[in-house]
Amino acid sequence: MQIEVLTLFPELVEQVVKFGIPRKAVEAGSLQLTTRNFRDYSEDGDRRVDDRPYGGGPGMVMEAEPLQRAVEAAKQALGSTAKVVGLSPQGEPLTQQWVQRLAQEPALILLCGRYEGPDERAMGAVDLELSLGDFVLSGGELAAMTLVDAVARWLPGAIGHEQSAQNDSFSAGLLDYPHYTRPELWRGVPVPEVLLSGDHKKVARWRMKQALGATWLKRPDLLSGLKLDAEQTGLLQEFIAESQAART
Ligand code: 9D3
């Protein structure tokens, strides 16, 4: 998959493929990341791309023309069918469902805003707006890097431990179960016995129960969106009963 990020800070965005899974995806040839600087499409000599807002008020607005020209150049490079995704506080919340949908696209153009955001008239070039959530960033770059990282995990050759992506989907919609490694006894705290039993079915059941329990405790909103099967319902009932027994 080809991703081109349009930004005022290309060097910041390029860091995302220097480490970890996104780097592996690039090395495997399944991800190509390029950047394009809006300033290269400025209309005046001093590379300015912002101006004061009509109607007054604080801050600056990104001019429509450099933005539109940068998108057009990106489409020349990636093909006219490339999906244009704007990162903005007005976007739909980014979810794993969006990540997996976007990972299937052959080409993405990611638009990063700075200042107060783009001139509204340039928004016609955008197919989809995504947000990381209801908090204020100083620009779209960290959101674009987040999206590149999340998408890279789903590209062929990216994940060292191949089970990880499968594991992610196995537990889709649930929080993770707790993890343990050596030593068996750490500062007087033992590893749960079941994990030493070698009984893979028992381990899987315990992990599912812990994942359901953690989700029930910390993110009940996630549980209400899921359809648990009969075994999961039983495991969660056990977890709840045990946590209530432990409180008395
Ligand atoms: C403080 C300025 N705000 C006035 C009410 C508006 C505003 C403009 C530009 C707020 C943030 C930004 C820059 N943010 C992004 O480009 C951004 C973002 C975010 O701020 N939060 C969550 N997800 C994203 S994706 C892009």
Image (spheres, rainbow, N blue to C red):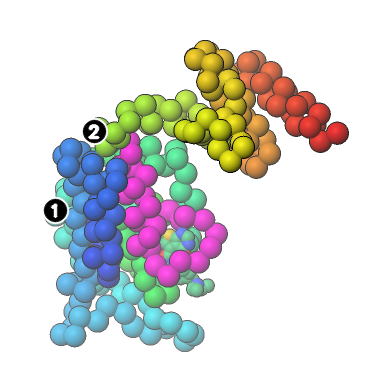
Q: In which quadrant of the rendered image does the C terminus lie?
A: top right
Q: Circle 2 sits on which residue?
A: 157
Q: In which quadrant of the rendered image does the N terminus lie?
A: top left
Pick the front one: 224 or 79: 224
Query: Residue at point 53% right, 63% down?
Result: 135
Q: Which structural element holds mark 2?
A: loop
Q: Quadrant of residue 210?
A: top right
Query: Residue at point 53% right, 20% down?
Result: 196
Residue 27, position as x, y percentages in the image: 17, 42
Residue 197, position as x, y percentages in the image: 54, 16
Res 194 seen here? yes
Residue 49, position as x, y percentages in the image: 27, 78
Q: Earlier in the sequence, mark 1 or mark 2?
A: 1
The residue at the far right in this view is 248
Q: Circle 1 sits on which residue?
A: 77
**From which residue to which does the magenta span run?**
130-154
Cα separation, mark 1 vs mark 2, equals 24 Å
Whether residue 56 is situated above or below residue 67 in the rendered picture: below
Query: Residue at point 16% right, 60% down?
Result: 73
Q: Is residue 236 left or right of residue 50?
A: right
Q: Is residue 220 left or right of residue 175?
A: right
Q: Amino acid at mark 1?
A: Ala
Pick the front one: 126 or 197: 197
Q: Amino acid at mark 2?
A: Gly
Q: Quadrant of residue 38?
A: bottom left
Q: Is residue 179 left or right of residue 50?
A: right
